Image (spheres, rainbow, N blue to C red):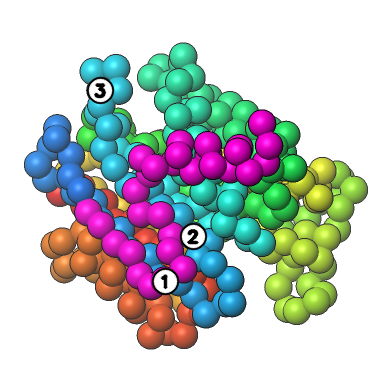
Amino acid sequence: MTGREFLHKMKETVKEKVGRGSSASADSGKGKSKMSKDITHGYHLVKGKAYHEMEDYVIAKFKEVDNNEVGLFAIFDGHLSHVIPDYLCGHLFDNILKEPNFWEEPEKAIKKAYRITDTTILEKAADLGKGGSTAVTAILINCQKLVVANVGDSRAVICKNGVAKQLSVDHEPNMEKEEIENRGGFVSNFPGDVPRVDGQLAVARAFGDKSIKIHLSSEPDVSVEMIDDDADFLILASDGLWKVMSNQEAVESIKDIKDAMSAAKHLTEEAVARKSADDISVVVVKLQ
């Protein structure tokens, strides 16, 4: 199979994804659970000011799997290329859900699927090209159990009784400097004023990035949150939002907006108003 044929096949595979980034303007959408009429979701994406294609991609949908309903929500924030986040849209959740122990041990299944997916991306580097992607994923199982995983600096925040609780970990190079140096890499603020792995990448964990992968990790942090009466809503967003807004500010900004898509759009508009120049993508899942 030639590289062009592979990319064409990949694009056909990812047609099912929702909320693909666009270099044209904004993109948005909404949906709801069939199991619970109270649980809805909405997303909104806005291209940043950089002179390249939109590199944020979003998944937001509910799906029936093995007589269970799963809400699948993700944000993939690419760097140097949009191809790898595009690939993740079509493959990461499939790899997670086909793990035989997913229902019994979702944390282990997700970690294994992240590892398998990254290995495949590296093996296909000749077709997928250079660059990589961060990822934050959230799987809502039967409207009761929320499993969040991430690599990089996109973030998941849940609002419980009006209070923000971060469910993901920001993988900043300074926080993992020792591990990076143990792999033979280094963390430098030059060029610029942001800590970067080998002076190149501003996150310590990511998919892809074959040229410096030996110094990076793709191991996700995974957390589990049970959805009870205290849970109001979930926010997933790329760092284009979190660079200019704290977790609690984001929660306060949308706590009175009932429509999930309107809430997601409001957060992107607020980030732009605060001079965020990055691509901004937001998913809001209303849990009440």
Would you say the residues marked 3 and 2 are in contact, meaning their CB atoms lie under 8 Å apart?
A: no
Count of labels in the image: 3
The residue type indicated by label 3 comes to Asn
Q: Residues within 10 Å of mark 3 (few under 14, many from 20)?
A: few
Residue pointed to by mark 2: 56
Q: CA distance from mark 3 to mark 1?
A: 37 Å
Q: In terms of depth relative to the viewer, which is nearer, 228 or 217?
A: 217
- Residue 223 seen in render: no
Q: Residues within 10 Å of mark 2 (few under 14, many from 20)?
A: many
Q: Position of residue 134 (x, y in %)?
A: 58, 52
Left or right: where does residue 255 sit relative to residue 243? left
Query: Residue 84 in magenta?
Result: no
- Between disc 3 and disc 1, the foreground one is 1
Residue found 48% across the figure and 19% down from its top: 99
The residue type indicated by label 1 comes to Ala
Q: Position of residue 30 (x, y in %)?
A: 22, 54
Query: Residue 3 in magenta?
Result: yes
Figure quadrant of the N terminus: top right
Question: Which circle's residue, 1 or 2, is located before the other in the chain?
Answer: 1
Residue pointed to by mark 3: 68
Residue pointed to by mark 1: 24
Q: Which residues are the magenta region? A: 1-30
- Between disc 3 and disc 2, the foreground one is 2
Residue found 50% across the figure and 65% down from its top: 54
Residue found 58% across the figure and 71% down from its top: 52
Q: Secondary structure at mark 2?
A: strand
Q: In terms of depth relative to the viewer, which is nearer, 173 or 199?
A: 199
Q: Is residue 72 above or below residue 133?
A: above
Residue found 72% across the figure and 53% down from its top: 130
Q: Is residue 121 above or below residue 29?
A: above
